[in-house]
Image (tube, rainbow, N blue to C red):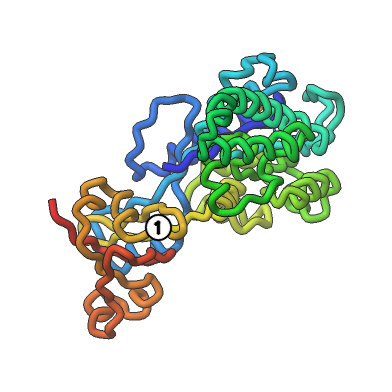
Amino acid sequence: ALKCGIVGLPNVGKSTLFNAITQAGAESANYPFCTIDPNVGVVTVPDNRLDKLTELVTPKKTVPTAFEFVDIAGLVEGASKGEGLGNKFLSHIREVDAIAHVVRCFVDDDITHVSGGVDPTRDIEVINLELVLADLESMERRLERLASKVKGKDKDAIYENEIVQRLVTDALSDGKPARSLDFDQDELKIVKQLNLLTSKPIIYIANVGEDDIAEVDTNQIVQKVRDYAAKEGASIVPVSAKLESEIAELQGEEKDMFLEELGLNESGLDKLIRAAYDLLGLYTYFTAGVQEVRAWTITKGMKAPQAAGVIHTDFERGFIRAEVVSYDDLLAAGSMNQAKENGKLRLEGKEYVVQDGDVMHFRFNV
Ligand code: GDP
């Protein structure tokens, strides 16, 4: 499953949010996960299409696709120099696909703010600077390692060296994240391999007080986060971590009623999952058999064999063909047989690029 790391200064509401996530995961009992790592919370991805497919196919079971949140507590000012639990936490961030940065937007005099009053812009800059410094250090080490190869006129090393130099000079040593630079497709391949913290996609989570969640659009403190995110081309999701922990204990109708009372149409967690999905360019495809209707996560642009490989590596290796019908066509037809009669069931080969909402059946050799 894809991983999203939760970072932020101490006392901003990370644990509260993470507990809500874990609780929500525990409630979705039909997801077969068996994680024992206390720092990982698995949540299922909400998707109405899965419910509709279940009604249509009436399978024995339905399995949503999942998303992992990793609690990366301990990132404080000075982490890049080994303060707090420093480098250990930075290395955890290297392993995630995206970063969710929790920013304190709630005002509460009883809860100490590590750097004084509530000021999201300053908080964001503190954390981002640590990430930039960590990247700067690792890129300087990289340059040292490349130096002898560059001297020996190694073409690949020279190419990479140029990119790393640009990262250092134009972004990192100016305190700017790697994602602030534009690279072409070939350069991006190299940048990806460098595994930089500041090139990971980022979402800012504005943690507001429970009483403020209904009016986040006009909240001045949240606006500061919005402005910062806009400058970076990042997205923002306002949540009330405290409220989410209450919502996470509810399910089904009870949950819907509670949300309605609050004037919300979905929980902050659901919004967060959706934002992460968009940010990461993720698609969902379905398999729909009488045994099981199931949603699978892939990245945009994946071809049929790779998408099959998400189910099992054997499916990718032995891929022959895929039977595909789009969710809309299947729903309009009302049954797989009718979709077939309507000519909506296609046979696709190795080069087929899977679309969001495709309902797939793979044929493969074992
Ligand atoms: P962490 O250090 O970032 O993990 O922060 P915690 O989740 O432990 O939260 C720190 C304190 O802030 C706890 O006492 C929480 O109950 C409190 N807190 C979290 N979110 C809110 C909120 O929206 N409003 C208020 N008033 N307190 C909150």
Q: Position of residue 77 (x, y in %)?
A: 74, 21
* Residue 327 showing in the rendered view: yes
Tell me which corner region of the image, top left, top right, bottom left or bottom right, holds residue 177. Answer: top right
| 215 sits to left or right of 365 | right
| 84 sits to left or right of 123 | left
Residue at the spot 34% in from the left edge and 45% down from the top edge: 30
Where does label 1 land, which residue? 302
Amino acid at pointer 1: Met
Viewer-nearest residue: 57 or 96: 96
Viewer-nearest residue: 16 or 323: 323
Viewer-nearest residue: 187 or 20: 187
Residue at the spot 36% in from the left edge and 60% down from the top edge: 303
Q: Position of residue 290 (x, y in %)?
A: 21, 61
Tell me which corner region of the image, top left, top right, bottom left or bottom right, holds residue 322. Answer: bottom left
How many C-alpha atoms fall within 10 Å of the one at disc 1: few (<14), some, or many (≥20)? Answer: some
Q: Quadrant of ligand 1?
A: top right
Location of the N terminus (image quadrant): top left
* Residue 100 showing in the rendered view: no
Residue 75 in the image: above or below residue 199 = above
| 296 sits to left or right of 318 | right
Residue at the spot 84% in from the left edge and 27% down from the top edge: 109
| 15 sits to left or right of 286 | right
Residue 349 in the image: above or below residue 20 = below
Look at the numbered disc 1 and give the secondary structure of its residue. loop
